[in-house]
Amino acid sequence: MAKTNKSSDLDLVGKIYDAALDPYLWHAFLEDCAGRLNAASGVMSFHNTLSKELRFVEYHARDDDYFKQYANYFVTLNPYLDLLTGEGASLYTTHTLLPEKTLEQTEFYHDWLKPQGVHYQAGAVAFRDSARIALVDFERPKAQQPFGEQETTLLATLEPHLKRALQMNQRFWDHLAQPSAAVSVLDHLEFGVMLLDEHAKPVYMNQQAEFLSRQSHAMVVNKHELVATDPEERRTLERLIGEAVETGRGLGAKSGGVINLGRFSDFPLYLLVAPMRTERNDLGLSAHRVCCAVFITSPNREVAASVESIREMFGITNAEANLVWELANGNTLEDIAVKFGISKNTARDQLKSVFSKTGQRRQVDVARLVLSSPTALVGESLLLGKSVGGPMERRQVADRRLLPRKIPA
């Protein structure tokens, strides 16, 4: 008999919608619902019904090793998948889907269910199409009674919410995919990017912005503000940010501007302040509406492009690529000859070869060619893929939420 003293139906419904936006919370729902149903364990699983593959699983009070065995072998023997595929009922108890005597004669029961003490199951189909099915089911040992009407009534109450929650989950992550990818790209840019909200408070900074703010004493960044250390520069920067924020809020017409911070310091910074107009469709509840972007560079920052990327992009030799990299970083032919232990004539010959291969005629044009190339704008880590394949393991769901880089206190 289902228990009634652990949580109300509304509590369970609330946990379902919490988990729709944060998959880590499905475990809490399964645990509470198992308690309400007097079940020994609960499982949420996603299957590809065509290939008989387990795509995702979350569970309460079950053994990790058994699910590895299930994913690698027993999923292909699961007799319930075929019975639940198609346009069948959304609620089920396994003893009505398949007679107990028939189930007990299967390898699936003897070698996988029985060793875990699972005999009776009751559940709901939370999602189903021609190739996929999502099941939420709860389990009891043979010593208990089969799930009855009271338990299936609770599952009937939860079933439409489970379906809606998975629809929300799919739409939420589909909408989040593009901005998430965009924010990921920002972290690979070789210039700083900061985003400010409608109160001019920093809400995001990429890796380069974090690096440049640490290297330079010309500005200070914390969770409350972005300010210049020089009083006169501070007033100018505050004005530019204030105007950009007003325009971003739709209340002004100024386009921001540029400012040089710490021009006579060891590490000066160049800032471009620009308004950002973002759609507001959150009923005004969002804590951070981005209204201003600040782009940051420094003349003291080395060119991001590597010698190897320059060589490959422009079809030149390694020695020529070294020379081009040095020119792009402001060094003279004399400096380059000394650094690499070659004569100035050899350096000139290499430069002539670069001119011929790139179609340029002046050193400044060669430097400009590198500085305008993608290799100088995007860190090479963006180009390096990492394999995430491998044996089926019980993994936590990837956290795909947008978590802004922590702004210093």
Image (cartoon, rainbow, N blue to C red):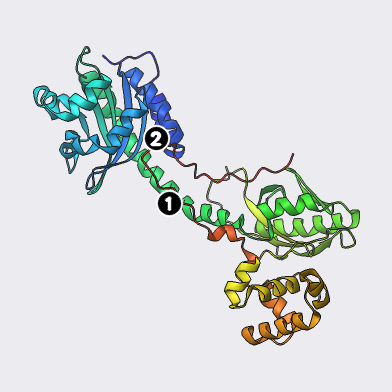
The residue under the point 75% across, 44% down is: 222
Measure the C-alpha gap from mark 1 to mark 2: 24 Å
Q: Secondary structure at mark 2?
A: loop
139, above or below 363, in the image? above
Tell me which numbered mark, 1 or 2, is placed earlier along the sequence.
1
Q: Label 2: which residue?
A: 394
Residue 309 screen position, x and y as percent: 60, 68
Position of residue 35 relative to residue 230, above or below, is above
**Left or right of 276: which side holds 92?**
left
Name the residue type under label 2: Arg
Q: Which mark is residue 53?
A: none
Query: Where residue 215 sits in the image (x, y, percent)?
Result: 79, 52
Q: Is residue 272 above or below residue 158?
A: below
Q: Is residue 375 left or right of residue 386?
A: right
Q: Which residue is mark 1?
A: 174
Q: Quadrant of residue 254?
A: bottom right
x then y, percent, for residue 351 = 72, 82
Residue 89, picture quadrant? top left
Residue 248 placed where, x, y %?
Answer: 66, 58
Nearest the viewer among 343 and 46 is: 343
Q: Classify mark 1: helix, strand or loop.
A: helix
